[in-house]
Image: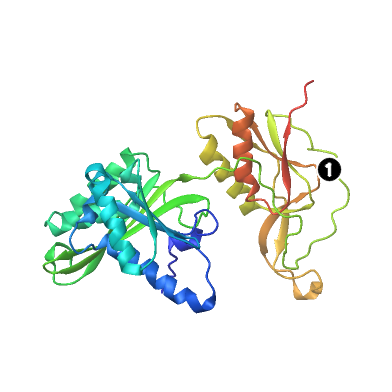
């Protein structure tokens, strides 16, 4: 069975804020939670007005002691505001009668609707309900999102596609979708197309880019490792501790072992950023073999085949170097590399001769 994680819940509290922001004691929590659900359902499924045509991406709710602040993020705010703001006032009064509290309603416009997964999913479901070809619909939606500036998009449909007797899944992927990268801004949307043959589920993931850190991130000083044949690394690096080939270098601050897989992961992370900009140099080489058998095992039992290879790193060792980039670009690139390292690192410059 595949293990699926909702990309919104995965990033909530880390890279994204909460859709409902309020605090309540245990006795009132359930009541206020039901009120939030009523507000969102009332806006999405209004009994008389078709607010769905306005392109509502999300509804954020914030509570104070006196009132409830409701913010609608829509693609076409004119359909909700109405002439001289009459529609938004009427909607605000209807919400107040629904929950019995004073509501402060705000409407904010979304700049690029093609980058919001919920709006793209609803757009696809509307076209499927009009009996459009599902493959052409998925491909056109992906092209429009990529043209709008998305780094990647994945569209998945599930149901009786094309009126087939047996339900199945079809998906279309364009660009990069790093779902496990927390720094990636992944917009997720779900909608259902009510066709004559049954419901068709529409899921959309859109990669809006990677959030770059302003200052260079450093790993924690203490990192927990399983016990292997790790001897005590004494002293600082006397060789390979200066920048030679490039203009900027990534220098270790702690001793440790650097796996060959970690070195390669750092190279990939850097190359994805400096592609076509500068040049990357790797200053360390994994020369020491590590076996799964611990050091205390007697020689008669055998050490076994090497499990992986590591490079012994002392404080001050230069791990990577960059040339042909500006200092700001080097900081961003090394910040990506720092997330891969198992010890603390810092950026250093080449000393003038």
Q: At which x and y percent is residue 67? A: 44, 60
141 lies left or right of 215: left
302 lies left or right of 338: right
Find numbered disc 1 in the image and state the secondary structure of the residue it sits on.
loop
Q: Nearer the viewer, residue 166 or 58?
A: 58
Quadrant of image for the C terminus = top right
13 lies left or right of 244: left
Q: Residue at x 30, y 53 (%)?
A: 56
Q: Nearer the viewer, residue 2 or 233?
A: 2
Which residue in the rendered view is the most extreme toward the bottom?
A: 27
> Which residue, given by chain and number where applicable, does mark 1 sit on?
237
Which residue in the rendered view is the most extreme toward the top?
A: 353
Quadrant of image for the N terminus = bottom left
Q: In this picture, is 252 found above or below 291?
A: above
Q: In this picture, is 39 found above or below 16?
A: below
Q: Residue 278, located in which quarter of the rendered image?
A: top right
Q: At which x and y percent is residue 194? A: 17, 65
Other-residue count near label 1 (Cα within 10 Å), few / some / many at <14 / 14–19 / ≥20: some
Q: Residue at x 42, y 71 (%)?
A: 33
Which residue in the rendered view is the most extreme toward the right?
A: 235
């Amino acid at each position: 069975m595949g293990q699926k994680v909702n990309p919104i819940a995965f990033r909530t509290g880390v890279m994204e804020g909460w859709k409902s922001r309020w605090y309540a004691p245990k006795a009132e929590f359930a009541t206020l939670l039901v009120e939030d659900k009523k507000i969102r359902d009332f806006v999405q499924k209004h009994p008389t007005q078709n607010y769905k045509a306005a392109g509502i991406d999300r509804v954020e709710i914030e509570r104070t002691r006196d009132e409830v602040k409701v913010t609608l993020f829509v693609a076409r705010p004119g359909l909700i505001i109405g002439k001289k703001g009459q529609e938004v006032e009427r909607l605000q009064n209807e919400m107040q009668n629904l929950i019995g509290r004073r509501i402060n309603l705000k409407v904010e416009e979304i700049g690029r609707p093609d980058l919001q997964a919920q709006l793209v999913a609803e757009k696809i479901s509307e076209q499927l309900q009009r009996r459009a070809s599902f493959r052409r619909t998925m491909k056109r939606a992906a092209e429009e999102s990529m043209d709008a500036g998305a780094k990647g998009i994945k569209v998945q449909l599930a149901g009786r596609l094309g009126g087939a007797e047996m339900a199945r899944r079809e998906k279309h992927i364009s660009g990069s979708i790093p779902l496990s990268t927390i720094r990636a801004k992944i917009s997720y949307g779900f909608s259902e197309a009510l066709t004559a043959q049954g419901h068709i589920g529409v899921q959309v993931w859109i990669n809006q880019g990677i959030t770059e850190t302003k200052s260079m991130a450093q790993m924690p000083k203490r990192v927990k490792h399983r016990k292997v044949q790790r001897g005590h690394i004494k002293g600082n690096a006397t060789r390979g501790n200066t920048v030679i080939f490039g203009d900027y270098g990534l220098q270790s601050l702690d001793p440790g072992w650097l796996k060959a897989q970690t070195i390669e992961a750092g190279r990939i992370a850097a190359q994805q950023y400096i592609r076509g900009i500068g040049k990357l140099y790797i200053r360390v080489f994994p020369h020491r073999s590590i076996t799964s058998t611990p050091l205390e095992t007697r020689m008669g039992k055998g050490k076994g085949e090497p499990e992986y290879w590591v490079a012994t790193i002392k404080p001050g060792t230069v791990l990577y170097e960059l040339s042909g980039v500006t200092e700001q670009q080097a900081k961003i690139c090394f910040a990506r590399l720092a997330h891969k390292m198992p010890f603390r690192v810092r950026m250093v410059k080449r000393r003038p001769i």
